[in-house]
Amino acid sequence: MSPKLQEEIKQTKPFASREEEVHLNIVRTAEYLADRVVGVLKASELTGTQYNALRILRGAGATGATCGEIAERMVTKDPDITRLLDRLETRKLITRARCNSDRRVVRAHVTESGLALLSELDEPVREVHRRQLGHLGQEQLAELSRLLETAREDRS
């Protein structure tokens, strides 16, 4: 069992299982990593989910994306993509328009202002990632990524 994690969370009893220990270690690490990125985004008055949505729309290119497509691609799930997009549209970081061929479909597109903001954030966010994880080296990073992907495989 991990004495370091137990010490960090001030747990005096042993973990019930190795699985519980690993789960808590992943959650604790995810919180730590996300907190540093949030610090970079805060200066631009963006949340992590807003940043994620903007990056998705940048990747979607000229075709943009629907709420459903954005929701499918989000790293962390947001139950109300519409409200998330409302906030980005209010800031003029995205636009939304009804599809001509199917008026029920609304596609979102990142604006020039949104692209400029993302461009400003690209290097600072990359630098945070390098500071947080660069010491692991490429081989360990690849192995960690593989293990995390394996952990997400549905076993039910």
Image: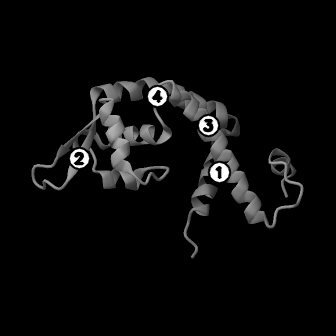
Residue appearing at x 39%, y 51% in the figure: 80
Q: Quadrant of the C terminus?
A: bottom right
- The disc, 4 or 3, on the residue closer to the chain's N-terminal end is 3
Which residue sits at x=56%, y=34%? 38
Residue 4: x and y in percent read: 84, 47
Instruction: Compare marks 1 and 3 and give the one earlier in the sequence.
Output: 3
3D distance between C-alphas at marks 2 and 1 = 36 Å
Q: Above or below — where is 18 with respect to 79?
A: below
Q: Mark 2 points at which residue?
A: 107
Q: Which of the two residues, 139 or 94, is positioned nearer the viewer here?
A: 94
Horizontal side of residue 93 vs 73, given as left or right: left
What residue does disc 3 label?
A: 35
Q: What element carries label 1?
A: helix
Locate residue 48, reporting x and y percent. 49, 39
Q: Determine whether, in the image, residue 116 is placed left or right of residue 108.
A: right
Of pointers 3 and 2, the one earlier in the residue sequence = 3
Q: Position of residue 15 (x, y in %)?
A: 82, 62
Label 2 crowding class (10 Å Cα cut-off): few <14, some 14-19, many 20+?
some
Q: How far apart are marks 1 and 3 (CA)?
A: 20 Å
- Real-space Cα separation, disc 1 to disc 4, in angstroms: 31 Å
Residue 56 location, quadrant: top left
Q: Which amino acid does label 4 sit on?
A: Glu
Q: Which of marks 4 and 2 is in front?
A: 4
Q: Which of marks 4 and 2 is nearer the N terminus?
A: 4
Q: How far apart are marks 4 and 2 (CA)?
A: 24 Å
Residue identifier under label 1:
144
Q: Residues within 10 Å of mark 3 (few under 14, many from 20)?
A: few
Q: Mark 4 points at which residue?
A: 45
Residue 69 higher or lower than 111, as above or below: below
